[in-house]
Amino acid sequence: MTIKRMDNVLIVVDDLEAVKAFFIELGLALEGQTTVEGPDVGQLVGLGNVKSTIAMLRTPDGQGIELDKFHTPEAVRFGPMETPVNALGLRRVMFAVEGLDDVVARIKTHGAEIIGQMQYGESYRLAYLRGPEGIIVGLAEQLG
């Protein structure tokens, strides 16, 4: 058996509404939102007494970002919110975009701060932004 596709990436958040609005402004669509709880959920994720609210967002081509707000047990912040890009672990999510400048301007209204921008030869314009809760998002606009 082989992997068929990547379905989603989980991001645990404290302010679900702010992060959800950020990704929706970026162009993802809210697929659904629900609250899950109980011993089966706790056993699945390796925690006891779990209650969390999950929002599933999808890119236009079907890739998923799952946002998870833990009510019990409370989420634990591990490290600073402004963790540098070279810290070990999952550090950013990259999206292909059209109209990089417009996308950057729109998501800045949702609290994003520019980390850096560059043009990679004649191929791409790139931008790294830090959004709500320190989430790093990369944007790539193909040139030509």
Image (cartoon, helix red, strand yellow):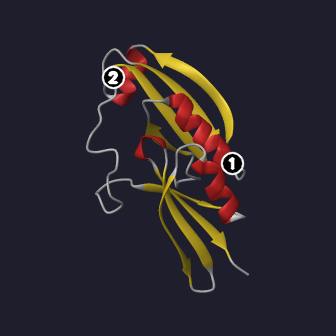
> What residue is shown at x 56% (from left), y 70% (from top)?
126
Neighbor class of circle 1 (other Cα within 10 Å; few <14, some 14-19, many 20+) is: some
Residue 77 occupies quadrant: top left
The residue that label 2 is drawn on is 74
C-alpha distance separating marks 1 and 2: 29 Å
Crowd class of label 2 (few under 14; some 14 to 19; many from 20; radius 10 Å) = few
In the rendering, at what x and y percent does residue 130 appear? 46, 52
Give the vertical position of 4 relative to 101 (above or below). above
Which residue matches tag 1? 27
The mark total stands at 2
Q: Mark 1: which amino acid?
A: Gly
**Regarding mark 1 in the picture, which secondary structure is present there?**
loop
Quadrant housing residue 80: top left
Callout 2, which amino acid?
Answer: Glu
x then y, percent, for residue 110:
58, 43
Viewer-side residue, 11 vs 15: 15
Q: Residue at x 42, y 13 (%)?
A: 38
Is residue 79 shown above or below 37? below
Task: Tell me the number on the disc at residue 1.
Answer: none
Q: Is residue 79 left or right of residue 112?
A: left
Relative horizontal placement of residue 6, taking residue 75 as reference (left or right): right
